Amino acid sequence: MPKEEAEEPNVAGPEITETPAAALERAREAAANRDPEGMATALYASPILDGLVRRIDQRYHRLQLEDAQDAVAEAVEALYAAVSQGRRIFSLGGYLWKVASRKAFDMDRRARGETIVDETKLEALAGAAAEGTDADIAAQERRAEQREKALKTARALLPQLGQKNLRQVMGYIFDALEAGEVDVPGQEIADALGLSLGTVHTSLSRGFRRLERLAREKGLLTAEFRELATELSETEDEQHD
Amino acid sequence: MDNVAKQSPDLQDAFDGVMRQAYEISAEVGAEVEAVLEAGTAHPLSLDEARALIKKVFTIIVQRAEERGDRETVSALAPDLDAAVDRVLKSRTPQVGPRKSQRLELKSHNGIDPGPVRPTPHYYGRAVPMNGGFVNTRDITLWEQNIRLDIHLDQFRRTYGREPDAQERLDIMGSKLQLPGITGDDEFAIADLARSIAANGVQRPPVIDLDGTLLDGNRRLAACNYILENDEFDATQKQRAEHVFVWQLSEHATDEDRHTVVVALNFESDHKEPWPHYVKARKVFEEWQALLALETEVPNARRQAQMKREVSLRFALGPETTVVNRYLRMVEWADAFETYHVIDKKRDEYVVKHNASEHFEYFDELSKGARPGSVAYTLIQDDAYKHLVFDLLLEGKFKRWDQIRKLGKIATNADARKYLMEARAASELEDGQDLVDDAITVATQADPKKREVGANSRIESFVDWLEQLPVKSFRDVIEPENLKKLLHALALVEKHVKSSLKDAGAPSG
């Protein structure tokens, strides 16, 4: 029995002539060739831009639709800047989602009157240079210096993680952090290190836990992190007994 | 490393930031990206919205390109931004004119016309308007994202290198299409359901989407097709199965409506074949991972508890987080089990997955205990022992899940552990199971708390009773199975008894 056809109002709905994955790859290629119009055309051929705006709008009720569009536009620009400058992005969809949702989150916090604490994160994520007074710039430089020191400290703990897989996977994450990567999917790590996705996930889960334990022993964690680590440990004990 | 960092709050803050960023960048967002694509397909931007967005994109790109001195990008867009925006918008085809959609229309049958379902169905306090009417059974398509079939569909894709078509999905549900690792003849109990439907009709309307995709009632549909294709059923029964009364979502239904319907009708028991725990737990785990990915900083314990409550409510698991926590632990252990067998032992992925599904309740027991001596603690500390347990589990040598509780005691008892290793090596399943029983017996015997109480009086009573038992009872009264058990038990303890008597300087008979 043939299915009935229904008339619907005119919307800019995409006719599926290629898969979203193919469209995203086309976008990547265009950005790598410094063709922003080509990139935008490819992204628009897939439902990714529509979906990003809709999901952000749905999730952050305080924001207007315009704000959701701003967040998505920033994410697309960040993607273009990263790819056109030769940065390696494993998953364009994941990258766009992380940057856009982070931007929207910050807008939401501003709307609630909260301040954004860690500007180095914004810089790392969006590549946007912060401007301000000399004091601001000095503070930023100090934070950048401390961050470099913290990364070195974290790396120094890696040999104590034990299993080789854990060391390799966590090392990869820190490499990515240093390179300013925004999104490092498990599959990327699995492909790079020749591990299964399951092993990567397990290694990440264990790696973070052990790293936190080591950091706690060495007094590296803030009070908030110590509280989190202690509460999690106590909760787990209660549940397992 | 010394504790210099304690005196440096700046370094602590910076380390905190590094850890949080590490979590953030490594968070998997695959499921969220899928949801984004679905949302974009279901609710595309209007032309005005798209224009505003693309214009913003180009404006920011030009601005940032100027800041970093990227002349090539600036000159690619700057001359006429609006024209570039127009070209992008026109690139989406087709745009003008009505969009045709595939809609499965409800029809009349046996004097019953289609119409709104009254009262409006409610799921978790949410009204989901639907229309009721008849459709041809063969026009309904199995739900592609049916979690019940997740492993099977993945296995099919891997085996045949393509998606199964509608008939093949039905064949999988009807256990006609054999895939490695599936042990049951009728895994989804379709034949029994078909006989019930043949006799009584479909009692509860399946729920379908606008395009005819099933959201609830995959087994009922598979059963109707089973009736149509089997000679076991007569013409009248086949005729009854040709049309089915369904509830169909309205054109105003949202993704949240679909999710609510699926969860309400599949997560709660309603005397139907529910999703196995393995499937439910995986779904809960995925939802948890998706929520974690959205957190822009590491959630503290209170926030995690709140998130888990949200997950629990979302899946109708109650206001407490007990079930969610349990499911998360079980999935982690199932993953460890699968990783070991697939990666280390190079076993077939889907055989292992089916096995994990079959033994999923065992992972609950495996995950318990954070203190020394408990099962989970012991397995985490001792990889070799953990792998031994995983091997025994895969081979089906644990007869019951409660045997898992004894693994903590067995680990610290060399004799008991030896029995487990022999169990793994046993080629016959029953022999292996018996050896596991022996391991438990030995370990339990060694448990001073459990076994010491009343030991002397028990033995005195038993020996008195045994010595006074008429000999012919062994032949006429006691069942052979019990005789075997008695002999087995005596042989097991003989060695220990003789050793104890020797130590005590007493004759051993």
Image (cartoon, coloured by chain):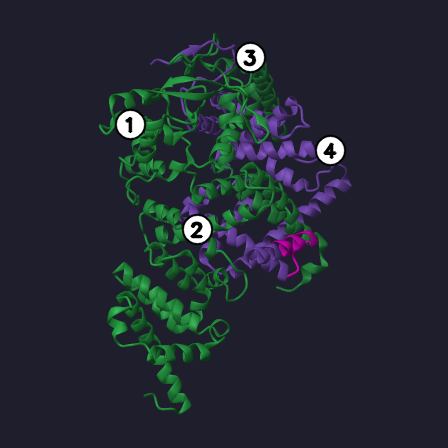
Regarding mark 4 in the picture, which secondary structure is present there? loop
Chain A hue? purple
Dot 4 corresponds to which residue?
A: A112
Q: CA distance from mark 4 to mark 2?
A: 45 Å
Q: CA distance from mark 4 to mark 1?
A: 60 Å
Residue B178 is situated, as x and y percent measured from the top left of the image, at 26, 39
The chief SS type of the magenta part is helix
**For residue B330, which numbered disc appears in the image?**
none
Q: Amino acid at mark 3?
A: Ala
Say yes or no: labels 4 and 2 on the same chain: no
Along the viewing direction, whichever of A57 and B283 lies nearer the viewer: B283
Regarding mark 3 in the picture, which secondary structure is present there? helix
Looking at the rendered image, the disc whose residue lies closer to the viewer, 3 or 2, is 2
Q: Quadrant of the C terminus of chain B?
A: bottom left
Chain of residue at mark 2? B
Q: Give the chain ID for the green colour.
A: B
**For residue B83, which numbered disc appears in the image?**
3
